Amino acid sequence: MRRLLHGGRSHRVGYVEGVAVRADLRRKGLGGAVMAELERVIDGAYAFGALAASDAGAALYRGRGWQLWEGRVEAFTPDGIVHLPEEEGASSCARRARGPTGPAAPLVFDWRDGDVT
């Protein structure tokens, strides 16, 4: 779970990270099976899901209905809110079925040690 601020509202978000399939086992449905279970948890317990995909993994998520977030991404830090341009772009996805509907306001993620240096 992560907290995310969008448009002045705080959301409990199911944040997906660290999903990988060993190279010799790819394209066998394992990533999809893992994501199906994660999506079941997200749909049942959180406002929506979010993730930052690798270029190699982005197609899996988009094929499952995850949508590209085209807006700004930021994080709360001990020094204030910091822009995270490296988290934006072609691989940045957010499952927005019940979440933010447009990039007019940034997604501002909660602080976690090691996120921003």
Image (tube, rainbow, N blue to C red):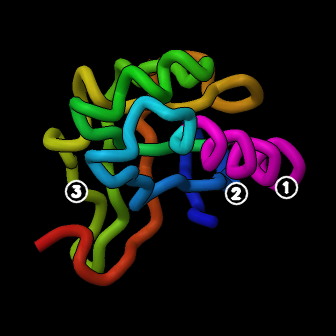
Query: Who's the residue at 56% across and 34% down the image?
Result: 29
The answer to whether marks 3 and 2 mark residues whose Cβ atoms lie closer than 8 Å is: no
Q: Amino acid at mark 3?
A: Val
User: What range is drawn magenta here?
Assistant: 32-48
Quarter of the picture holding the C terminus: bottom left
Compare residues 71 and 39 and report the one nearer the observer.
39
The answer to whether marks 2 and 1 mark residues whose Cβ atoms lie closer than 8 Å is: yes
Q: Residue furthest front?
A: 24
Q: Which residue is mark 1?
A: 45
Q: CA distance from mark 2 to mark 1?
A: 9 Å
Q: Which residue is mark 3?
A: 82
Residue 28 shown in magenta = no
Place of residue 34 in the rendered image (x, y in percent of width and height, measured from the top left): 62, 49
* Secondary structure under the numbered disc 2 in the rendered image: strand
Place of residue 17 in the rendered image (x, y in percent of width and height, measured from the top left): 44, 57
Residue 42 shown in magenta = yes
Query: Who's the residue at 27% across and 47% down the image?
Result: 23
Residue 12 is tagged as 2
Instruction: Name the image quarter holding residue 51.
Output: top left
With respect to residue 97, does 41 lie above or below?
Answer: below
Tell me the crowding category of disc 1: few under 14, some 14 to 19, or many 20 or more residues within 10 angstroms, Cα based. some
Tell me the crowding category of disc 3: few under 14, some 14 to 19, or many 20 or more residues within 10 angstroms, Cα based. some
Horizontal relation, residue 61 to residue 54: left or right: right
First in sequence: mark 3 or mark 2? Answer: 2
Place of residue 22 in the rendered image (x, y in percent of width and height, measured from the top left): 33, 54
